[in-house]
């Protein structure tokens, strides 16, 4: 349990000793720092419970608090708000414990097994700007949940099923009709056949085939046939499809690598399709499938609905599966293989209806136990200055790779690297660019839209990734320079700035808990900025390494070390790497 939580427990005991039974003392950081560091606000509710005047209750509590030498400046404000301040000795003591063991500044949660479905990549289509947020938020939530004690599996859930794949294979067939994959009489081993196609080709082929299918009815019909052949695992077609998936997957992995995003599972929609028969049986048994114009549907409307809730399309009239059904089959697959307590889905907020339908149908069919949590974690859009989804200059869809290059060009201008090779420079500017992008993406509350402002994101000053990296590297280099100094603990607390830093440090458990509850990164991003700015103020106020008072110098180094550790921890939670220098 965190030190601050323990302190809260002690406060509960003190209030009990004062004669009042309290569950939540409403102990929180003060909104009026001039009156004290923390507030205890439960006197008002206790007054109702005990039929007493709140000030009288507050006075009783204060009398008990005064016996505890950790507190100072205890006073009552207004109707019965109790203000308290921790003594410097207490703050120093807590900081020293955190220095020894960071886990006393984190509140672990009751451990759950969680699958996070994020990223949203589709085979043979280039990742575009729209994919940034799912990858960024999903990866960070995965790391945060792990930090808080959960067992987490990230699943890429590749879009590898359906018409787009048929279109791509058809277009390849038009380009290379002589390939053995399309030769019914070919009896050789397909795994030995080279596919003369790169990922760049694939990224061109899909848009081309998509346009053709819209303009030409025959082409579309052919694509349908090819799709059906792939889905029924027809020899040749199925084999070329698998190769296309591999080529595409390799490239998707590379982009995710650059973004510091990783998966334990690389399942695809097509893997779930294998579970359809079993799913169908469950739905049949539950007796919730209805016929509608040759299709099978599930009614998911509820009386309390205030907006339209169309039925879920379970099986299309042509016998193929809808996107909803692949998600239902995926739930079945996940329950059977991993039996998670929770499944989280990180997609943009245009998929809210989709997941509501899927979850309702899953519950109706009792596909999951009642206490299994299925949660959609929707996010807003990254927009251009015009308030519309961010596009290329000529209004096209911008690929994620291009977006990263764009930010890299900007960061390379800002960082003045001395004697490094061109290669190092490229690597550092990429790390800084990714930090700029990911931090900016983490800063707004998840569900809101934000505007892509490259100059602002890449700035070395202000609430930016580069500012945090620069400051964190500076802390590290200070600690490296001090490597011969034996700093074991903080001895003295010298200034208000130092007090502020320790109070911010003690607030970390609270920030982490709030972030996982909201499944948003904004509080962590704000916290990092606050702690770093406070530290930089302290850094500018003091000459740490040349300080003559040894005890003071050691104390300052300890403070630096703890802030550095927290920054490293939280940047890692956000999936942001810290370069050696910049
Ligand atoms: N590939 C999908 C898309 O591009 C997103 C997948 C989200 N996950 C899910 N289980 N449906 O929209």
Image (spheres, grey):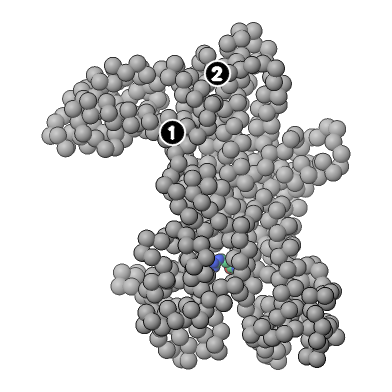
Q: How many labels does the image show?
A: 2
The crowd level at tag 1 (other Cα within 10 Å; few <14, some 14-19, many 20+) is: many
Residue 278 locus on image (x, y percent): 48, 79
Q: Which residue is drawn at 58% across and 11% down?
A: 551
Per the image, the residue denoted by label 2 is 489
**Residue drawn at 45 percent across, 41 percent down:** 108
Residue positioned 51% across, 81% down in the render: 277
Judging depth in this view, the residue of 159 and 501 nearest the camera is 159
- Taking the image as drawn, is residue 490 in sight? yes
Q: Where residue 223 sits: x, y (%)?
A: 69, 85
Quarter of the picture containing the C terminus is top right
The answer to whether residue 385 of the structure is visible from this angle is no
Q: Is residue 245 left or right of residue 14?
A: right
Q: Residue 321's x, y, as percent?
A: 54, 81
Above or below: residue 322 compared with residue 382: below
494 or 457: which is nearer to us?
A: 494
Instruction: Please tell me which residue lies in front, 383 or 193.
Output: 193
From the image, tell me which residue sits under label 1. Answer: 2
Closer to the chain start, of discs 2 and 1, is: 1
Q: Which of 413 and 119 is in front in this view?
A: 119
What element does badge 2 sit on? loop
* Residue 87 placement: quadrant: top left
Determine if the C-beta at disc 1 is less than 8 A from ligand 1. no
Numbered label attached to residue 318? none
Q: Residues within 10 Å of mark 2 (few under 14, many from 20)?
A: many
Q: In what element is the residue under mark 1?
A: loop
């Amino acid at each position: 349990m965190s030190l601050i939580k323990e302190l809260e427990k002690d406060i509960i005991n003190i209030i009990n000793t004062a004669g009042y039974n309290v569950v939540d003392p409403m102990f929180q950081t003060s909104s009026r720092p001039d009156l004290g560091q923390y507030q205890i606000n439960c006197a008002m509710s206790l007054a109702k419970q005990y039929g007493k005047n709140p000030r009288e209750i507050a006075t009783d509590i204060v009398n008990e608090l005064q016996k505890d030498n950790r507190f100072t400046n205890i006073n009552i404000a207004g109707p019965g708000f109790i203000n308290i301040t921790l003594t410097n000795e207490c703050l120093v003591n807590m900081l020293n414990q955190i220095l020894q063991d960071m886990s006393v500044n984190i509140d672990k949660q009751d451990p759950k097994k969680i699958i996070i479905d994020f990223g949203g990549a589709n085979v043979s289509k280039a990742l575009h700007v729209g994919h940034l947020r799912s990858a960024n938020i999903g990866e960070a939530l995965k790391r945060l949940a792990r930090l808080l004690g959960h067992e987490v599996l990230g699943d890429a859930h590749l879009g590898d099923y359906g018409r787009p794949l048929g279109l791509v294979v058809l277009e390849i067939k038009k380009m290379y009709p002589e390939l053995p994959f399309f030769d019914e009489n070919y009896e050789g081993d397909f795994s030995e056949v080279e596919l003369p196609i790169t990922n760049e080709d694939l990224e061109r082929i899909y848009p081309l085939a998509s346009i053709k299918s819209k303009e030409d009815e025959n082409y579309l019909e052919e694509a349908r046939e090819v799709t059906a052949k792939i889905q029924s695992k027809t020899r040749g077609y199925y084999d070329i499809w698998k190769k296309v998936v591999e080529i595409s997957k390799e490239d998707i992995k590379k982009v995710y690598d650059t973004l510091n995003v990783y998966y334990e599972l690389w399942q695809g929609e097509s893997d779930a399709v294998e579970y359809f028969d079993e799913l169908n049986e469950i739905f049949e048994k539950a007796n919730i499938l209805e016929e509608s114009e040759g299709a099978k549907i599930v009614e998911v409307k509820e009386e309390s609905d205030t907006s339209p809730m169309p039925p879920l399309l379970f099986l299309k009239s042509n016998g193929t599966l809808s996107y909803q059904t692949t998600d239902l089959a995926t739930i079945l697959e996940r329950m059977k293989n991993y039996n998670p307590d929770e499944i989280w889905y990180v997609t943009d907020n245009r998929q809210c209806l989709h997941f509501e339908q899927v979850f309702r149908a899953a519950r109706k069919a009792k596909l999951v136990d009642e206490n299994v949590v299925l949660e959609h974690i929707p996010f807003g859009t990254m927009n251009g200055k015009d308030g519309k989804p961010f596009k290329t200059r000529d209004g096209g869809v911008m690929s994620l790779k291009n977006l990263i290059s764009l930010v890299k060009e900007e960061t390379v201008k800002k960082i003045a690297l001395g004697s490094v090779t061109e290669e190092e420079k490229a690597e550092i500017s990429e790390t800084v660019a990714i930090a700029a992008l990911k931090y900016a993406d983490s800063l707004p509350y998840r569900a809101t839209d934000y505007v892509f402002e490259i100059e602002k994101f890449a700035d070395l000053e202000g609430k930016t990734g580069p500012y945090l990296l620069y400051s964190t590297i500076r802390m590290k280099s200070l600690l490296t320079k001090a490597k011969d100094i034996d700093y074991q603990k903080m001895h003295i607390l010298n200034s208000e700035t130092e007090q502020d830093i320790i109070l911010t440090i003690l607030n970390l458990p609270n920030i982490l808990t709030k972030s996982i509850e909201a499944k948003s990164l904004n509080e962590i991003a704000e916290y990092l900025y606050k702690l770093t700015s406070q530290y930089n103020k302290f850094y500018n106020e003091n000459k740490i390494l040349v300080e003559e008072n040894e005890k003071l110098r050691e104390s300052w180094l300890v403070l630096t070390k703890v802030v550095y550790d927290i920054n490293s921890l939280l940047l890692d939670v956000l999936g942001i790497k810290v370069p050696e220098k910049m």
